[in-house]
Each structure stands twice: as C-alpha cells, then as structure tokens.
Image (tube, grey):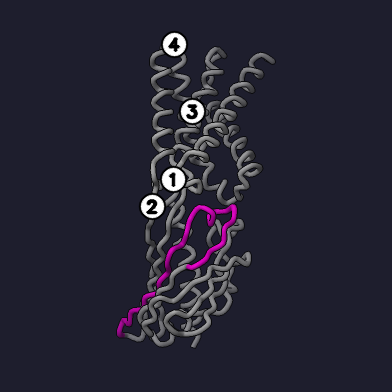
Amino acid sequence: MNKIFNQKLKGFALANAFAIVLISITAYFKPESALLVFSEFIIIPILIGLIIAYFLRNLPAISTRKLVGYSCYNTIIIIALSAIFLHEGVICLVIVSPLLIVFIFLGMLGGRSMFHRDNEILNVSVFGLLMLVFIVDSLSKHNYTNMVADEVVINAPVSEVWKHVVAYKRIEAPNKYWLFQIGMPSPVESTAEGYYLGAKRKCIFSNGYVFDEKIVTYDVNKNLTFDITNQPRDPEIMGHIDILRGQFLLHDNGDNTTTLIGNSWYKLYVFPTWYYDIWAKSITRNVHLRVMEHIKQLSEEK
C-alpha cells in the first residue's frame, strides 16, 4: 500500500514540478509576458496527465472514475500553487478550474492507453509533438479583441434617458449575476466632470476600483462613446482583460419609448479564446445589463 501511495505521490510531484519549469520558461521567452497562452491551459495540463499516468502504469488498473478524481486533486494543487506564487484571485481560479480538470483528465486517459501498449515510439512521438506545439505557441504572437452589444427598451423618451447615460447615481439594487455575488466587482456609479466632448468620466465599481474614461463622441440624445484611459490591475479577471471602449446608443422608437444599446470593446490576454471569450462575454454582458437596468429604472421613475 505504501509503495502504491509513494508511486502516486511521485507522479503528482514530478508532473507539477515539470509544469512549473515549463511555465517559467514560457514567462521568460514568450513575446508578451502578460499573456497566458493556449499551451499553459491545454498542453501543460495534458502533459501533467501523461506524466501522472506514466507513474501509474505498473499499478493495478485504475478506473476512469478514479482518473477524474485524480484530475480534480491535481487541479486543487495547481490552484493552490497559483494562488500562492502567482497571486491569482478566486474568480480567476474558479474560471480556469474546469479547463484544467478536463485536460489533465484527457492526458491521464490518453496516457493510460499509451503506456499499457508499451510502444516507446508512440510515447515519445506524442510527448514530442505536444512539446513542439508548446514551443511554437509560446513563441507566437497573440492578439484578440471583441465587442459585446446588449439592448433594453425603456418606457421613457430619449431626452429623459440621456440624462442618466453620461452619469448615474449609485446603484443600490442587489446583484443578480453569480460572479458578482461571489465577489467579482460590479459597477455601482458613474460620474463625469461635464456634459461635453472630451470630458473625463469615471466608472466606479463595488470594491472601489475606478475606470478612468474620456468622452470621444457626444451626440446629444443619440450617442455617447468613451475610451478607457486607465483601468485597475488586480489578481482577478481584470488582470487578464482590457476594456478598450464603451458606448451607449439611444434610438427613439416613436412611441415615447427608447431603445438603449450598450456596446463594449475589449482585449483578452488569456488563451484559448474559444473558452475564455465565453466568460468575457458573460461578464461584459452582465456589467451592461446592471448599468442599463439601472438607467431604465431612473428614466421610468418620472
């Protein structure tokens, strides 16, 4: 029993040590050190799974269910190490956990099959291919921007809605979005130094974070566009995304109602985008809706 435990412990320890070495190399050599690339969330977890599977190859057959459990255990280890040494925040770790569990599991599943076949050429080829992908991805440039749009219909004329678009008083409504409820900062207030083109604007979040903005389009009752000139850095998701620009468009529906459209442009620094952009869209959309529902409430009060 002790031998089996020691073999498992050795597998977990060496797999994570290998991952730390690869991440350190990536941080040193990749073109933009702020980026967290595809390989760090896909290739490295697969390699972790393969290494653990290698150390388990001579042990009694391990069920798929146990492999899932081992994947969860190792994800907890990675999360703990990331929180301690990389100072990642809780929200970020919640978001990354499913990705790690899935690809560590796939690595272990593939490794169980590979190592039981005892085919050294196949084993070396797979490991070499993964390392090649890791190197190419780490040295490549990455750039991804996107825009999210949302709209609400407000039972008030555009002139009334416009009053609350440039700046709005503090939001007192409880958060509905689950990430806001577990601690992610949510928008609570917007202030402006004036109602004119070029005026400075601030978007204040629940934890005191302030996004500094500058109005770049000021078309009364129609279009308010602002660039983000400064934004906070913190261990949470805001450390991995830049909000570039925001916009409110107002459309007079001709029946004393207004369609308010909120647009945001952002840049991601975490990959793969097919996974992280789902989260980015969801977070951005819920920031929109919290602000726009508040504007709707203020506009319809009279």
Q: In 3D space, how far apart are the residues under numbered discs 4 and 1 (Cα atoms)?
A: 34 Å
Residue at mark 4: 118
Lower sequence index among marks 4 and 3: 3
Q: In 3D space, how far apart are the residues under numbered discs 2 and 3 (Cα atoms)?
A: 26 Å
Quadrant where the N terminus sits is top right
Residue in view at x 40 percent, y 29 percent = 132
Q: Amino acid at mark 2?
A: Tyr
Residue at mark 2: 144
Q: Outermost residue toward the left? A: 254
Other residues around mark 1 within 10 Å, as few (<14) / some (14–19) / many (≥20)? many
Q: Position of residue 164 (x, y in %)?
A: 48, 81
Q: Which mark is residue 271?
A: 1
Lower sequence index among marks 4 and 1: 4
Residue sitting nearer the eye, 69 or 208: 208
Marks 1 & 2, CB-CB < 8 Å contact: yes
Which residues lie in the magenta part? 229-254
Lower sequence index among marks 3 and 1: 3
Marks 4 & 3, CB-CB < 8 Å contact: no
Residue in view at x 62 percent, y 35 percent = 77
